Each structure stands twice: as C-alpha cells, then as structure tokens.
Image (spheres, rainbow, N blue to C red):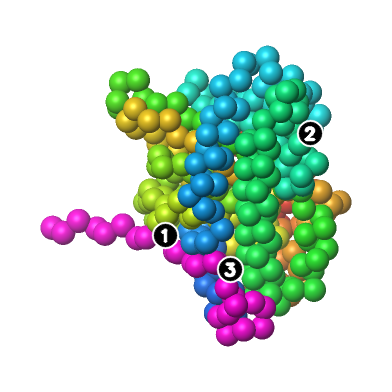
Amino acid sequence: MASKTLPKLPVIDLSLREDLRPGTRTWESMCKEVCNALEEYGCFVIICNQVSLNLHSEIYSAVQDLFNLPSEIKQQKPAHRGDWPIGRSYSYGPKHERIDTENLTTLEGAQSFTKLMWPSGNDQFCKSAHEMSKIMMNLDQTVMRMVFQNYGAEKYYDSHIQSTDYVTGSARYKESETNENYLGLLGHTDKSFSTVNHQNGVSGLEIQTRDEQWILYDPPSHSSFIYLASDAFKAWSNGRIRSCYHRVIMGGKKIRFALLCTTLHKGTVISVPDELVDEEHPLRYKPFNHREYRKLHIEYGSKKIEYSIEAHCGVTGV
C-alpha cells in the first residue's frame, strides 16, 4: 500500500517589487492566495528579498550574544504586563528560553533595550534587531492589508494598525544531549493576533493540518519567514481563518534560534466586522478585550485548565 503523501505548506512571494502594489492584478491575486492559505492552514511561508546574508549572519550572532548574558542581566527588567513577561527571560522547559521586547521596531526602543542589556553598548545587536523587527512588522502589515481588503473590510485597516502592538521575540532551543528528538514546545495555538517567524538554519517548527498530520517547516532560503494566524485573528475573522496549531520538535546536536514578531491588540475590544457576518456565516464571536483573554488564559493555564477563544467569547448555539 502506497504511503500517504504529506501536504506542503503554501508558499507566497511577498518580495518588494513594482507589480505587488494595491490595485494591481498581482496584488488582487495575492490577497486571495493569502486568505486561502490562512483559511486552510492558518499559516503560509513567505518568500521575500529583504533579508541579506549579512543581516542573517549579524542578527543570529547578536541573538546568541543576548542569550549568553548572565541570568541576572536577562531578568533585571520588571514584568510590567500581567499577560506577558515583556523584557525578561522566561522558559517553557529546561531546554527552552525566550526574551520578548517591545518597541524594537523603533530606533529609540532598540537603543533603550540594548543599553539595558549592554550598558557599554552593542551596535550589532541594536542595528540588526531593529532592522529585522521592521521587516517583520512590515510583512505583517502587508498581510493584514491583504486580508482586510479580500474580506471587504479595508475601511477598518488603519484603525487596526493603530491599535496594534508589535513585540519582537528571540527564542533558543538547546541541542539534544543524546542526539535523540525531544519536544521543544508543546502543541498549541498562539494567543496573540498573529506571529511572523524567522529561524536560523536549524529546523524544528511543525504545523498541524486539519486532518492532524504534522508538516515540518523547512525555509526555502535565509530570507524566508512563516506567518502564523493566532486565536484573536480567528475570532476577528468570525472563524474563517484558522488559528495555527504548531509545536517544536528538536533533534541533533544543534541549537535552534528563532525570531518572532508577535502582534497584540491594545484597543478596548476586537469585534467581528459586519462584512464578515451573513446567513452562511452567522456571528460566532462576541466583542472581546484581547489583553483580558490573554490574562485569563494564563490564569486557567496555571491551574492546568484549557481556556480557548471559544470559551472566552464564543457565541453559544452556533
């Protein structure tokens, strides 16, 4: 009996070029491709031309320097948000470490965080982290514009962007000491709105399909990203978009580094646009506060209780 062929993740070219502008045929076609990918997989691979080999080398050298700092340095910033330990090192396991930072998309924010970590300065980290953060933010905004336009909700795009916080994350997964695979991160959906993910040359991120098959994300090039839709995006779209279920499986004696641009809604509420509600798609999610959802998820999680976006704001009987 022939083995079942695994599906492949959708790949979409968002390289900067003249024909990829709002109003062009290429743009209109890409809008549909992006939404189809997010509806079916909750994610897609981005090909782009913004990350040079030099930037790729500099950012991962700088990220390694960040994780090599003493623990007391990485833990010195107070966790000022109840829904996220922003600015501090934290871990989901003995071989995992992550540091998330606000405002790296601005030069002032990058300089401030760099000075906190390295009082005497670290120009390579500051410049490369700032540049990568801007690239990931711009990719996210391009995808958002495409989605909003494709669903006929473009008039809400500007206010959505104004209500979005961009958090740059760095993650490290240690090598396997026994050369055997280990679970680096449990299967989950993100509780953010969206995530843009870039990694060094070590794979490990796996995406689950609708029929519960796992697909390994294998970047086509050093300038490739993967875009993941999260719980809040699913609710905003009235369930049209999937929240991407993913995990990290590590193997071999190599360290995996990943960069992430995570988006959070800082407005009062997220509401399903009227344009996404009709007879075929009745309202499935009530207006909700994104930060409140994240806080409750953490509270329930500390008690080993799963708390979904449906439990938080789902419309019963739909």
Mark drawn on residue 301: none
Mark drawn on residue 16: 3
Q: Is residue 303 visible?
A: no
Residue 39 pos. (x, y %): 54, 65
Residue drawn at the location 74% of the way across and 64% of the way down: 272
Q: Which residue is more in the foreground, 73 or 118?
A: 118
Mark 2: few/some/many CA within 10 Å (<14, 14-19, 20+): some
Mark 1: few/some/many CA within 10 Å (<14, 14-19, 20+): many
The kind of residue tagged 3 is Leu
The span shown in magenta is 1-26
Mark 3: few/some/many CA within 10 Å (<14, 14-19, 20+): few
Residue 120 pos. (x, y %): 73, 23
Residue 13 pos. (x, y %): 50, 67
The residue carrying mark 2 is 112
Report if residue 66 lies within the magenta region.
Answer: no
Q: Secondary structure at mark 2?
A: helix
- Please tell me whether the stretch drawn in magenta is mainly helix, strand or loop: loop
The residue carrying mark 1 is 9
Residue drawn at the location 13% of the way across and 58% of the way down: 1
Q: Is residue 57 visible?
A: yes
